[in-house]
Image (spheres, rainbow, N blue to C red):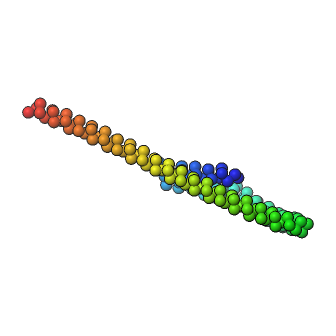
């Protein structure tokens, strides 16, 4: 899977969980669904089949790798070095993308909080004006009755 897509998916999931009104309840619901799916007998069978196949193929792959390494001595070291370099590069990019996603999620949460506070402030001001207007009408009505 492309690391950028994975990081994007993780960021979207985090943003959804953090930003959802349902919050923890929705997270618990999703976690329960994933857990239920993981324990499903069909998924368990596929996991077992894949594990069995991997155990069967591991010796074959090892023999082929050893044969290739024996045939080309410098090749295996070169492949190992390249793999380590690519893995480090991917790890660095993934870390940077995850930090960026976390920063964006934090900014989104702050923005949502600020917008929510502004809405609350406007609502409080509107309620205060409405209350003052109602009290003024009651005072006017009391003055007319006297």
How many marks overall?
Answer: 0
Say if residue 60 shows up in the picture.
no
117 left or right, relative to 5: left
The one nearer the camera, 33 or 143, is 143
Residue at 62% x, 50% y is 8
Q: Nearer the viewer, residue 27 or 123?
A: 123
Residue at point 89%, 65% (across, down): 72
Image position, residue 61 (x, y; %): 84, 64
Residue 64 vertical position relative to residue 108 in the rendered view, above or below: below
Residue 14 pos. (x, y %):
55, 53
Check the picture and name the quadrant holding the C terminus.
top left
**69 vs 10, nearest the viewer:** 69
Of the pair 62 and 31, the residue shown nearer to us: 62
Q: Residue furthest top?
A: 144
Q: Percent x, y for residue 50?
A: 76, 59
Q: Does residue 99 show up?
A: yes
Q: Residue furthest right?
A: 71
Residue shown at the point (19%, 36%) measured from the top left:
136
Horizontal side, residue 31 vs residue 80: left or right: left
> Residue 120's image quarter?
top left
Q: Which residue is at a point 38% across and 44% down the rendered structure image?
A: 118
Measuring from the top left, give residue 36's x and y in whole percent. Answer: 61, 56
């Amino acid at each position: 899977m492309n690391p950028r897509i994975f990081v994007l998916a993780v960021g979207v999931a985090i943003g959804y969980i953090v930003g959802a009104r349902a919050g923890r309840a929705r997270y618990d619901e999703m976690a329960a669904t994933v857990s239920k799916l993981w324990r499903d007998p069909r998924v368990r069978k596929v996991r077992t089949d894949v594990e069995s196949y991997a155990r069967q193929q591991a010796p074959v792959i090892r023999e082929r790798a050893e044969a290739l390494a024996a045939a080309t001595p410098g090749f295996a070291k070169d492949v190992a070095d390249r793999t380590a370099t690519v893995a480090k590069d991917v790890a660095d990019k993934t870390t940077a993308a995850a930090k960026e996603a976390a920063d964006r999620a934090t900014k989104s949460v702050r923005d949502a909080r600020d917008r929510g506070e502004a809405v609350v402030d406007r609502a409080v001001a509107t309620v205060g004006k409405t209350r003052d207007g109602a009290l003024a009408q009651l005072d006017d009505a009391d003055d007319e009755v006297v």
